[in-house]
Image (cartoon, rainbow, N blue to C red):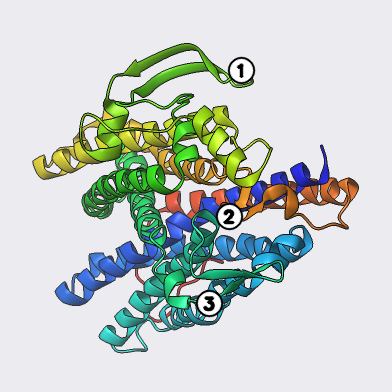
Amino acid sequence: MDAVALARWQFAATSVYHYFFVPLTLGLSVLVAIMQTMYVRTGDDQYKRMTKFWGKLFLINFAMGVVTGIVMEFQFGMNWSQYSRFVGDIFGAPLAIEALLAFFLEATFLGVWIFGWDTLPKKIHLASIWLAAIGANLSALWILIANSFMQQPTGYVLRNGRAEMVDFGALLTNPNVWVQFPHVITAGVATAGFFVLGVCAWHLLRGTHADFFRKSASIAALYAAVGSLGVGAVGHLQAQHMIRNQPMKIAAAEALWNTENPASFSLFTIADEAERRDVFSIRIPRALSLLAYNRMDGEVRGVNQLQAEAEAKYGPGNYVPPVAVTYWSFRIMVGAGGLMLLLALLSVLLVQMGRLHTTPLLLRVLAPAIALPYIANSAGWIMAEIGRQPWIVNGLMKTSDAVSPNVTVGMLAITLVLFVVVYGVLMGADIYLLRKYATAGPAPDAPTQPMSVY
């Protein structure tokens, strides 16, 4: 492997590790705030116990997310200095705002919430968790504003070999942001819903804290269903946006080698990527046009035609992303998402019938189904980033031109191994702590003591 490949592997490893924690933080922060709102409105101490129990798991996950996220920003300077030089005037602004505004808001009010139990008025204390949840989701917004510039550059001018910001408003209103951000937020809601639902299922199978986990499951089932429906609906809009603005990504995700009108949707394809042809394929006629344009016809451009267009515009080169990775990551994401929607809707139905806790077969499925949103989230992120290749900034800078000139293969190989080992330990610690406190169940309410994960 050369330096570019190792730098890509290193950033991929750290970002996938980090993204394991992000969606649960986004979704669980809001769910905990909802539970505390129900406590403040009703005065029911059961909701207070729920807030504290699920809040403790949220804090564990939040801490791990912070630790793994810090390293990613250092990599822009260490491994990707050419990229940072080229786009730093634009990319730096949303990252700085995320740290100075959103993260400070989140961290400050999270501290108030942790230590404010029974010392602050109920409504002030409730406001603190809502502000922390808003801060967490605003952090995601600013990160996605930065990432969306990489997907669809807006509000810039090229000057002296650099991309310089000329319109901050255009950066904020980038059309890619407003399909990507809702997709990430609804994915976070679904992740939190399935996490809580899975823990509840584990306890309900064993009959421990039955009333507590029945009530938690009833809230989580609805939350998971809302998130799963939302992520599917927004994902559809995001795919339609990609067809207009990143057609090569969609062509690779469908292994669509040549332009079709009407275009067929691939159910299963084995392809010869080098020859850019199908070896075996099962396709649904017109289905891709229907998904792309909400009608039974419409042109979807193929890989070969888009490659020719890119060569005419940018010069000789390979402008096709790794098709197999893009194709299968898309299907893993959609498959996991579809299964989540089915399980969430079934859970809601059984909750309404009062039978969820008496359906052991579903409970046995829901416990390991905690993994489904993590699989879908990781596959979706891989598809979004791999499908943009060979560009690090779509149409402006290639990934091969973005790596730091002075990093060596040895440096990158050693740090890659170290990052994977350290992040693996952190992942193990996170799973251990979450499992320890999740299986222990809620502790008796201790009103005079602040929350702690120690």
At label 1, the amino acid type is: Glu
At label 2, the amino acid type is: His
Task: Compare marks 1 and 3 and give the one earlier in the sequence.
Answer: 3
Task: Compare marks 3 and 2 and give the one earlier in the sequence.
Answer: 2
SS under mark 3 = loop
Which residue is label 3 attached to? 166
Q: Give the CA separation, mark 1 to mark 2.
A: 36 Å
- Tell which of 445 and 199 is nearer to you: 199
Q: Residues within 10 Å of mark 2 (few under 14, many from 20)?
A: many
Would you identify the image quadrant in which residue 320 lies?
Answer: top right
Determine whether 431 is above or below 84 in the image: above
Q: In this view, does 87 lie to the left or right of 78?
A: left
Measuring 27% from the left and 50% from the top, which residue is drawn there?
230
Q: Residue 272 placed where, x, y %?
A: 58, 16
Task: Compare marks 1 and 2 and give the one earlier in the sequence.
Answer: 2
Determine whether 253 is above or below 386 in the image: above
At label 3, the amino acid type is: Val
SS under mark 2 = helix
- Tell which of 251 and 438 is nearer to you: 251
Which residue is label 2 attached to? 18
- Furthest-left residue in this view: 353
Q: Residue 345 placed where, x, y %?
A: 20, 39
- Tell which of 137 and 153 is nearer to you: 153
Q: Give the CA separation, mark 1 to mark 3.
A: 42 Å
Q: Residue 430 placed where, x, y %?
A: 57, 53
Q: Residue 275 carries which label?
A: 1
Q: Is residue 137 visible?
A: yes
Measuring 33% from the left and 32% from the top, which residue is drawn there?
299
Measuring 55% from the left and 82% from the top, which residue is drawn there?
100
Of the 4 image quadrants, the one containing the C terminus is: bottom right
